[in-house]
Image (cartoon, grey):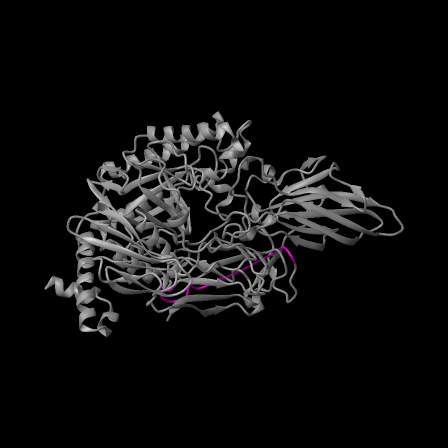
Amino acid sequence: MLRNKLANTILPNKLKKKSAFEKQIMGEWWWRCLLLITTVFLGTVHGGNVTYDRTSLIIDGQHKILFSGSIHYPRSTPQMWPNLIAKAKEGGLDVIQTYVFWNLHEPQQDQYEFSGRFDLVAFIKEIQAQGLYVTLRIGPYIESECTYGGLPLWLHDIPGIVFRSDNDKFKFQMQRFTTKIVDMMKSANLFASQGGPIILSQIENEYGNIERAFQANGLAYIRWAAQMAVGLQTGVPWVMCKQDNAPDPVINACNGMQCGTTFKGPNSPNKPSLWTENWTSFYQAFGGKPYLRSASDIAYNVALFIAKKGSYVNYYMYHGGTNFDRLASAFITTAYYDEAPLDEYGLIRQPKWGHLKDLHAAVKSCSQPLLYGTQTTLSLGSQQQAYVFKSSTECAAFLENSGPGDVIIQFQNIPYQLPRKSISILPDCKNVVFNTGKVSIQNNARVMKTQIQFNSAEKWKAYTEVIPNFDDTSLRANTLLDQISTAKDTSDYMWYTFRLNDNSPNAQSVLSIYSEGHVLHSFINGVLKGSAHGNHENLNVAMEESVNLINGMNNISILSATVGLPNSGAFLERRVAGLRKVKVQERDLTSYAWGYQVGLLGEKLQIFTVNGLSKVHWEDFQSSTKPLTWYQTTFDAPAGNDPVAINLGSMGKGLVWVNGQGIGRYWVSFHTSNGTPSQQWYHIPRSFLKSTGNLLVILEEETGNPLGITIDIVNITS
């Protein structure tokens, strides 16, 4: 009875359209998968002893082929976690992988935050409750398109520190935080050795990309990091990704899109082949288009990695989520890996999600020969081959066509058609149950439906930011200060101001500015005279504007804005931002008398909160818009449970808050080469909303028009 009920539930509709013979073969295969799935549902996927050999990770004495997906707890909300994890499990995943975000957990030295979206323990316990394993990538440098690579900015101010090197000051802080996280996990009994779900931990992150820059100190550091991590005695293995020389017993792992081709393999015969980041799309920068990676390409490369004795594949990202507030690194959009199998809102993207689900089931149906059989590779043509796995009782085959065209090959005297660049999986060495290039899942599309419009001036109040002059500043220096060192990541903004006495008969001058900021706005006597910005490939900004100076004293105020801090590369602590050179005509003002203000007045007064609103005078909205204007209004939450987004298509660039919570940076005016915004809709999680009277505050740097803003709900349609 249970067998028939479950089979009727799980067997795909497409089976009904096949011949009787095909139905028999497919039915037998799906029933084998069903037994596997039933075991997972009825059993407990909790820890135990975790070791490894050259075949795979070994959990409680059993070799495992594991499919994993990255879901980052701070890029979603606790209210979203159960649904995201459930969809990952339904998609055939065994493991959830996450980074640990040091900058979010310790924003000020010795001041910790582990509540709400940052509640790492609660996130892992939810994964455990749903019967999945966890890979914990502690780092604590993580990159992850996270500002400053996930390192807290206060590290920058420790004298003599060198990040990620054989430097005692950095190693002390890194070991202190890593130990804190490990101790938290132990206290909550979350390592598999304690009966918890964490089966694997990671130390460092893609250090192989920069190791040469540190010469001997790089090798010494990586050896120290491995020894330090192993010494914490978690009872589970450690991994280093993109680290071909990972010291024993730490496992070296692959990151990329084609690890079946590019991975050199384990650096020891005792280690398994692990793929820690299979990029399901790619991060998107403002001004850039989304990277659309096909479901068939992902599946092909996964199948090839498994065929070459890989046993662990993690999708980065399985759900990307949202770079709330100011989390994103330089020029990275607020939506993160929106093209993943689960989109920014947690909705299923087809065919990617469904095609990979079918792949996982096909691979799992071959588990016994893959894990315990002997592999043989056979040539079937110039660009075709078979990977055959035989045990004493079972046989499985992966038939690969790496060529650009469809072919028919012979395998064991049976003809098989292989589409271009595809792999067919035969769990019995006879019958094809899955081909990576044949995508039978129907596409779906995301639809935004407007629920609330703000197209009436009466709905808005406005406050225009005060442009500070030199006399308004208290921080002074006879040089151009570094924005990172001065602002300390408390704001994207820093004002550079000076006074210039002009007595020339010709008041027209040329103002030249070079900045390593990302964005510039120059004001002469309180009036905007020019703006400029860089891009993801070239962060620097050069601006040259003809300006009219008054006869007498001129107040020049230059607003430098970063769009996230850098997140990668060697010697991150040496990076600078902000103005580097300023000239008026040919007069170099670099060593002039400068006055500074970190952040905007509205930020300092927190006018994006209910308590801060009354600290400035809000005026009725006028039809004309000014740069650096704050707008506020209220709205009721849309009915239902569909995800909510704010459409900022009529705006320019700035920041958004709802009920005091940072939705993220928006930059609608920075268009792609197609002439469209990189991101127009911005996610407002349901948990950020009250039923009525939600406060919406927007800081607009440019001259966007808030009358075009709408609140939409997000649906999926075929």
In what quadrant of the picture does the C terminus appear? Answer: bottom left
Name the foreground residue: 297 vs 393: 393
In what quadrant of the picture does the N terminus appear? Answer: bottom left
179 to 315, vertically: above or below: above
Name the foreground residue: 431 vs 678: 431
Task: Give the residue drawn at x 20%, y 62%.
Answer: 30
Is residue 209 visible in the rendered image? The answer is yes
| Magenta residue check for 116 | no
Residue lying furthest top: 168
| Magenta residue check for 640 | yes
Is residue 72 visible in the rendered image? The answer is no
Answer with the quarter of the image where residue 31 lies. bottom left
Q: Position of residue 270 (x, y in %)?
A: 29, 36
Residue 499 appears left or right of 696 = right
**What segment carries the magenta color?**
627-642
Q: Position of residue 360 (x, y in %)?
A: 28, 56
Residue 293 appears left or right of 17 = right
Residue 57 appears left or right of 451 = left
Residue 625 appears left or right of 165 = right
Name the foreground residue: 318 vs 455: 318
Answer with the quarter of the image where residue 372 lies. top left
Name the foreground residue: 539 vs 413: 413
Task: Give the residue drawn at x 55%, y 62%.
Answer: 677
